[in-house]
Amino acid sequence: MRKRTFKFGLALPAMLLLTAALLSGCGDAMVLDPKGPIGAQQKDLIYISTLLCVVILVPVLALTAYIVYRYRDRKDNDAPYEPNWSHSTKLEIVWWTIPIVIIAILAVVTVRYTHALEPSKPIVSEKKELVIQVTSLDWKWLFQYPEQDIATVNYLYLPEDVPIRFELTSDAPMNSFWIPQLGGQIYTMSGMAMTLYLQADEPGTYYGSGANFSGEHFADMTFYATAVPQEEFDAWVDQVKATSEPLTLEGYETLRQPGTSQVQQFADIPESLFHDTVTRYVVDGHNPHAGHGAAAPEPQAPAETDAKTTNATEHGHDAHGAH
């Protein structure tokens, strides 16, 4: 009997050690090593949520092991037989109050972080944001830099400490854009233009991928986002412009065909290519993929826009107002 008790007494510590050993493999988890303000806040939310869950799980698991051991059947069991016992006010208060309080705390934390981490919410910064237009294809990523008039395939260059406004769509099955160390994923969908703000606080190379199953070569939809100082970013833009061929409409039609791709870069991009991709399925001024009655987005007006177009924009008919 003593030997049996000794073995059971080691069961709980052994389970805890095994759990710790298994979790040790998560030491390189990228989401727990954020390099930007969005990723840092998401890591905080993960830690807080995990801690609140542990407050419940650890005592419950420990009590479960204790109850199984304490009230096991034994030959010398002399515990009183109480078949009609069914209620304890003290125990009811404990096991109802603690979960309710924890769930309330978790609800408040979740609501707070949900509003703070709204994907389309701009990042407060003294620096001007950089716009990058992302199009998921079968099975590759096209990144357009409209202000720099360049594009890349399957790799990104970012200036450090600068807010990045990603505008995302899909010209293939729905996918999910994700750079774990910079922030959470957001879906790319045909006929839709999504917005995601991210920022890299320090130089480095960060892994990115498609986080949604999209067919045969979905595992090949990976890329790297390289954050560099502003001077290096500007030099890279000049290098792309000087050494790369332009992306033509015919070239894009070839690129969008199903298949994998190596890293590519282009010195010029067709005007309104991203807008045309988003509105590819627009019929009679309406986008069936954006919901019933949704107006098709319009491209940004150039600086010399006439007064009539300016007035229309002021009344909410610009690209962002349409969404």
Image (tube, rainbow, N blue to C red):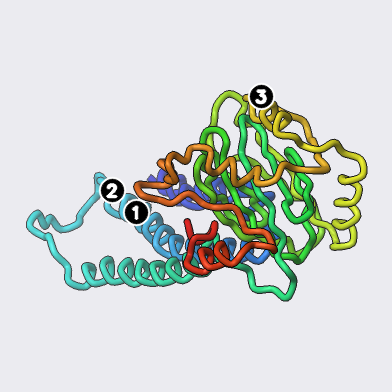
From this viewpoint, is residue 29 visible?
Answer: no
The residue that disc 2 covers is: 72
269 or 188, nearer to the observer: 269
Q: Measure the alpha-carbon separation of dots 1 and 3.
A: 53 Å
Give me the residue at 66% from left, 49% from top.
133
Label 3 sits on what residue type?
A: Gly
From this viewpoint, is residue 262 visible?
Answer: yes
Secondary structure beneath label 1: helix
Residue 38 in picture, x, y percent from top left: 62, 63
Q: Of the residues under marks 1 and 2, which one precedes in the sequence?
A: 1
Q: Along the horizontal axis of the image, is 289 left or right of 231?
A: left
Residue 64, labelled with which disc?
A: 1
Label 2 sits on what residue type?
A: Arg
Secondary structure beneath label 2: loop
Q: Measure the alpha-carbon separation of dots 3 and 2.
A: 61 Å
Q: Of the residues under marks 1 and 3, which one precedes in the sequence?
A: 1
Residue 204 in picture, x, y percent from top left: 80, 55
187 or 208, nearer to the observer: 187
Residue 102 in picture, x, y percent from top left: 37, 69
Residue 113 in picture, x, y percent from top left: 49, 68
272 or 221, nearer to the observer: 272
200 or 123, nearer to the observer: 123
Q: Examine the image and state in which quarter residue 123 appears.
A: bottom right
The residue that disc 3 covers is: 259
Marks 1 & 3, CB-CB < 8 Å contact: no
Give me the residue at 69% from left, 63% from top.
303
